Image: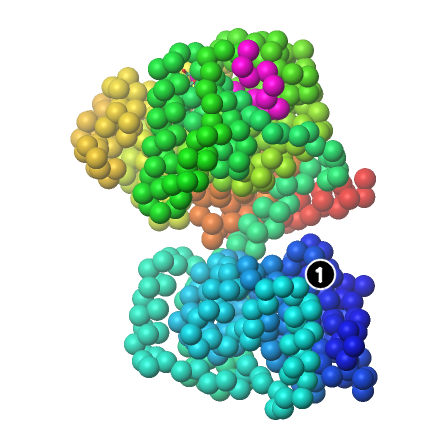
């Protein structure tokens, strides 16, 4: 049973019990509805309390049922809320820990609400491209006023219950209960047992002094922030209806909006991202109950760009870190950068000064390997050079205690080779953070041929603890993200050779929705990083054609923002990218030297070439089993490379376009003899799915079924 019924004297207690967050799935809804009927029919019962077992009152809809007929089967959430309202005995919601989405909407259908302090109250539907669909937009303004309610609905972010309970005039909570919540709720229910009429949120009036002015203002604000997402503006419309329409009309209006949003590509993409993020944490052959290794102390090798950021993740999570460097001045520089980052957070009010000191107190430094042997996990972030990595891993093998996990942050090198530098390849794993490592949410967990399952399970769990989204990648040059970006960068280079300017390419890609075009991204990350990688990579693949423009740029010392010049010009203290005459001249000269007559390219060609370069390489990565799922690839691109969220990632976008159409377009692009003639040959998996009328999503679903059966 996912909802329990018991009695406390004359009070019936219905407890949602559907771990982990008491999602309002079909069985739970039936359980609550039956509980209400039973309480109604029992003359000894005078009042009802609804609460949640474990870690939540209710987190809302049961995501396991999303898209299945069960999600809407009767009694649906609206039926259940109506049943609460119609109960002839007072129904009290006893809220604690989490009351979100449908969970909060259910509480709003009860006659009374009491809360424990510290509960997270939210209507987060906007985060998956929707508005609340079970009366949230009509009832919340009635208890909190339109302004607070709209704020909660448009942001989707949680607010603590005691904060809301303290607002003047609020009717969301009738009482904050400090002691045992259930005891308090039962006592409260008994107090109200004889009070009639029973109060209903739907009967409350919504008022505002200047609704027209306010909603106009809200609309302008939201339009500016929401950019390509339709849901936030619709939140404003729905909340406005709570004041401009009668309750039942407002409910119909809310439902219409909800249903229409459900089918927009943006909502589909956001839901895809939501499920993709959850799916990514699962590794088919590593059971979820795998015993993990304890990680109570971390060592980081290298205090450069990455080492510092990586360390901050662990300090933030309260895990002690020791950083090892070759020289004291490198250590000093690294620590100064960490301090600077924290101090900026303190200045912005994002971090309390005492927390900053606590974090710094967890950090120690050393120049000697003898000091790090007792760490449970060591992450190497030294120069991207196999020789340097070899020296480091041989040392680690010599000093680290047995069972310690040895991780490398390499972005492109062969992890199996790195593992082979040690006598314990089973303990070696890749932890590929993204820059800036203390900010970016993505962590590629690279599984070597010998990596032990408990090492993987430990790193995946630890990733969660430091608030990263982990995606597993097999071993190949560049793993998932950087292997794909190589093809994207090659196309970007060909576009320059053929006639584009860097700003034209960036503009087209940014219009498509990327956070940054390839050239602005290069300037931010440092063009020298790619240059260095190309030197190794293209030495290994001498016949691979790529544009030399990026190398020429680096030969001019134009590494990007850090040198004050890259694909663009920069002014001191200003990150604005100004088109560069020097770069334009350099490209022109290069075109002439290879005998290319520039032509005009339109935005569509630019975007198709860059995005389909990602899709085609993604399909190869999927087919080779480097990525476990197409949706994992999407997560890598959404979280690590600024792919537009409302397009769901490159693979989801290709599905939306239709794989047949994608392949057709690639065949068209292949008619342009420029660049690499083999480039647009569709990956075998892509060609097969396109021919079968398949999709990457269906491919993932088929694999999930197979691995469940196995
Ligand atoms: P960096 O050059 O900023 O820092 C490297 C640090 O390692 C330097 O402080 C250097 O003194 C130290 N170091 C070098 N050899 C050492 C040794 N034998 N023992 C101890 N310390 C040593 O480099 P960055 O950018 O931090 O890169 C480090 C690693 O992270 C590379 O493998 C790189 O491919 C990878 N990476 C870099 C990203 C980026 O955007 N910068 C993103 C993801 C991964």
Nearer the observer, 707 or 506: 707
Q: Position of residue 670 (x, y in %)?
A: 46, 35
Nearer the observer, 180 or 80: 180
Which image quarter holds the C terminus?
top right
Q: Is residue 481 left or right of residue 342?
A: right
Q: Position of residue 134 (x, y in %)?
A: 58, 73
Residue range in magenta is 370-384
Q: Position of residue 289 (x, y in %)?
A: 75, 39
- Residue shown at the point (37%, 17%) measured from the top left: 330
As drawn, 525 above or below 606: above
Majority secondary structure of the magenta segment?
A: loop
- Residue shown at the point (23%, 28%) measured from the top left: 564
- Picture quadrant of residue 21: bottom right
Asked if residue 382 is among those painted magenta in the image, a careful observer would answer yes
Asked if residue 542 is among those painted magenta in the image, a careful observer would answer no
- Picture quadrant of residue 691: top right
- Residue shown at the point (60%, 47%) measured from the top left: 276
Which image quarter holds the N terminus?
bottom right
Quarter of the render that holds ligand 1: top left
């Amino acid at each position: 049973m996912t909802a329990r019924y018991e009695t406390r004297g004359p009070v019936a207690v219905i407890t949602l019990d559907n771990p982990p967050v008491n999602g309002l799935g079909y069985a739970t809804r039936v359980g609550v509805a039956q509980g209400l009927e039973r309480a109604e029919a029992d003359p000894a019962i005078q009042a009802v309390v609804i609460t949640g077992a474990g870690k939540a009152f209710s987190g809302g809809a049961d995501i396991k049922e999303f898209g299945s007929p069960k999600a809407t089967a009767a009694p649906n959430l609206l039926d259940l809320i109506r049943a609460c309202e119609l109960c002839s005995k007072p129904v009290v919601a006893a809220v604690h820990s989490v009351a979100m989405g449908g969970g909060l909407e259910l509480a709003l259908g009860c006659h009374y609400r009491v809360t424990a302090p510290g509960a997270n109250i939210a209507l987060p539907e906007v985060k998956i491209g929707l508005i609340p669909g079970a009366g949230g937009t009509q009832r919340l303004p009635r208890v909190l006023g339109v302004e607070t309610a709209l704020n909660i609905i448009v942001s989707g972010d949680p607010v603590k219950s005691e904060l809301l309970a303290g607002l003047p005039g609020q009717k969301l909570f009738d009482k904050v209960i400090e002691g045992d919540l259930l005891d308090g709720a039962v006592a409260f229910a008994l107090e109200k047992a004889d009070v009639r009429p029973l109060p209903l949120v739907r009967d409350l009036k919504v008022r505002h002094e200047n609704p027209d002015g306010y909603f106009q203002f809200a609309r302008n604000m939201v339009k500016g922030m929401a950019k390509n997402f339709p849901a936030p503006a619709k939140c404003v419309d729905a909340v406005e209806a709570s004041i401009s329409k009668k309750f039942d009309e407002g409910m119909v209006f809310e439902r219409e909006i909800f249903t229409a949003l459900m089918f927009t590509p943006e909502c589909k993409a956001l839901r895809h991202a939501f499920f993709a993020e959850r799916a990514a944490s699962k590794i088919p052959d590593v059971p979820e109950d795998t015993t993990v290794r304890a990680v109570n102390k971390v060592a980081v090798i290298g205090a450069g760009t990455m080492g510092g950021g990586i360390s901050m993740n662990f300090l933030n999570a309260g895990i002690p870190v020791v950083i090892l460097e070759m020289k004291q001045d490198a250590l000093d520089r690294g620590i100064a950068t960490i301090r600077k980052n924290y101090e900026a957070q303190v200045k912005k009010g994002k971090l309390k000064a005492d927390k900053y000191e606590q974090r710094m107190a967890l950090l120690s430094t050393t120049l000697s390997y003898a000091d790090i042997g007792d760490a449970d996990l060591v992450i190497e972030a030294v120069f991207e050079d196999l020789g340097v990595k070899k020296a480091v891993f041989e040392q680690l093998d010599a000093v680290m205690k047995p069972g310690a996990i040895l991780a490398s942050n390499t972005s492109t090198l062969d992890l199996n080779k790195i593992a082979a530098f040690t006598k314990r390849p089973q303990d070696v794993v890749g932890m590929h953070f993204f820059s800036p490592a203390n900010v970016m949410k993505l962590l590629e967990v690279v599984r070597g041929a010998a990596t032990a399952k408990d090492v993987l399970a430990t790193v995946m769990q630890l990733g969660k603890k430091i608030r990263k989204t982990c995606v597993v990648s097999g071993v190949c040059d560049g793993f998932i993200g950087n292997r794909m970006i190589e093809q994207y960068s090659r196309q970007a280079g060909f576009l320059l050779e053929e006639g584009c300017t860097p700003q034209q390419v960036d503009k087209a890609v940014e219009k498509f929705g990327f956070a940054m075009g390839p050239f602005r991204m290069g300037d931010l990350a440092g063009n020298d990083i790619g240059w260095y990688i190309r030197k190794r990579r293209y030495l290994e693949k001498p016949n691979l054609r790529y544009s030399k423009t990026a190398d020429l740029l680096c030969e001019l010392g134009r590494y990007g923002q850090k040198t004050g010049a890259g694909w663009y010009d920069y002014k001191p203290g200003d990150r604005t990218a100004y088109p560069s005459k020097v770069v334009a001249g350099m490209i022109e000269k290069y075109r002439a030297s290879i005998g290319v007559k520039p032509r005009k390219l339109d935005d569509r060609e630019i975007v198709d070439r860059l995005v389909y370069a990602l899709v085609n390489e993604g399909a190869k990565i999927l087919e080779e089993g480097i990525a476990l799922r197409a949706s994992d690839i999407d997560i890598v691109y959404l979280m690590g490379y600024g792919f537009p969220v409302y397009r769901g990632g490159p693979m989801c976008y290709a599905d939306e376009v239709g794989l047949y159409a994608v392949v057709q377009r690639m065949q068209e692009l292949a008619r342009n003899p420029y660049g690499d003639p083999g480039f647009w040959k569709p990956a075998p998996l892509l060609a097969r799915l396109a021919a079968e009328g398949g999709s990457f999503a269906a491919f993932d679903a088929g694999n999930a079924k197979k691995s469940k059966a196995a």
